[in-house]
Image (cartoon, coloured by chain):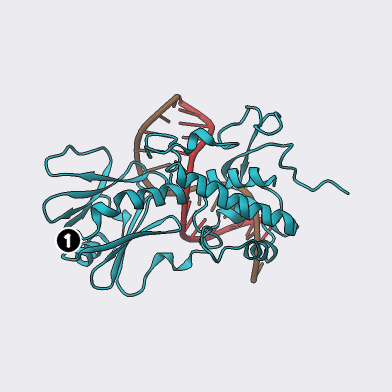
Chain colours: A cyan, B red, C brown
Amino acid sequence: MPELPEVETIVRAYRARVTGRRIEAFDCHWARQAAPSVAAVRRGVLGRSIEGISRRGKFIRMDLSGEAAIFVHLRMSGRFEWLEPGGSQPAHVRAAWRFAGGAKLLFCDARKFGRIIFAANGGDPTGRLGIEPLSRQFTPGKLAEILDSRRRRLKALLLDQTVIAGLGNIYTDEALFRAGLHPLRLSDQVTRGQAQLLHASIRAVLNEGLRRNGASLDWVYPGGQMQNHFRVYGRDRKPCVVCGLTIKYLKVGQRGTHICPSCQPLHDAPP
DNA sequence: TGGTATGTTCCAAA
DNA sequence: TTTTGGAACATACC
């Protein structure tokens, strides 16, 4: 489900609620979602306080007292819910942290793909992630270097979290559309000028997603508005907002992909 | 009923 | 060595 803007929105929404809370209990009902194990996570978090919450790529990181941290990846359908004592349980609760006072942070996940990882000195699952696309280090030159040093389809490259961390299927389609680049174009066949445009497009779609609190497409992630401002994602068989031609749906590396065949040519026109 | 889903990982094949 | 394809994970929705 969530990509960088959605995860960041969740982190911001929960920051005030979880910061400073002392964890009194942890449980997880679907064992494979907790790593290294449910018992290890419980042992690790019990008695510690949450000192901060942040995002790295699509991971949520909760720093704990005593040099430890919890990492949560929501994958396709994970979400957080807040439960006050006496409140009613939402559907698909897979794990819960109970704090002093009785309030609970719930981890709900219909598809059970999400992960909760406890790390004490090392074992940080975000270590393999690529550059943050909204960071100062992500420059047009850096993107050009990333594209040049490989020969991969643009869509596959942008979705690769070890290269750039945080883009998912939606924002990748939106960024490629705004840059006028076909998802199947090979990365080393992108000109310097196109790389610059792609860089600006990536930042623009992510920033717009943040401004609109993410995109809400189904029951999984509520509250966002970005779904009302897609230019290409989910618009197959509808007219392109730029040229009016019909938006096409194709599969690229098992992922549904939306393009305007006219605005996103596979090859540059000869001079 | 079958196809589809905002994600990642693992292995085989090219 | 690098890149891609397919399956797997598990469930809900239309």
| x and y percentages locating residue A229 in the rendered image | 53, 35
Looking at the picture, does residue B8 appear above or below residue A85? below
Q: Which residue is mark 1?
A: A22
Image quadrant for the N terminus of chain A? top left
| Residue A190 appears anywhere in the view | no
Nearest the camera: A115 or A55?
Answer: A55
Residue under the point 54% across and 59% down: A164
Q: Is residue A77 visible?
A: yes
Considering only vertical position in the picture, is A235 above or below B6? Answer: above
Residue A187 placement, left or right of A30: right
Chain to which the residue tagged by mark 1 belongs: A
Instruction: Locate residue A99 relative to residue A139 in the image: left or right.
Output: left
Residue displayed at 42% across by 47% down: A6
Q: Where is A86 relative to A163, above or below?
A: above
Residue at screen point 69% across, 56% down:
A195
Residue A85 x %, y %: 12, 44
Q: Amino acid at mark 1?
A: Arg
Q: Which quadrant of the structure image shows residue A39? A: bottom left
x and y, in percent, of residue A115 in the image: 35, 55
Relative image position of residue A50 (x, y in whole percent): 24, 62
Count of all numbered marks drawn on residues in the image = 1
Of helix, strand and loop, which one carries label 1? loop
Residue C13 vs residue A20, the one in the foreground: A20
Check the image and name the residue furthest to the right. A271
Q: Residue drawn 32% across and 55% down?
A: A32
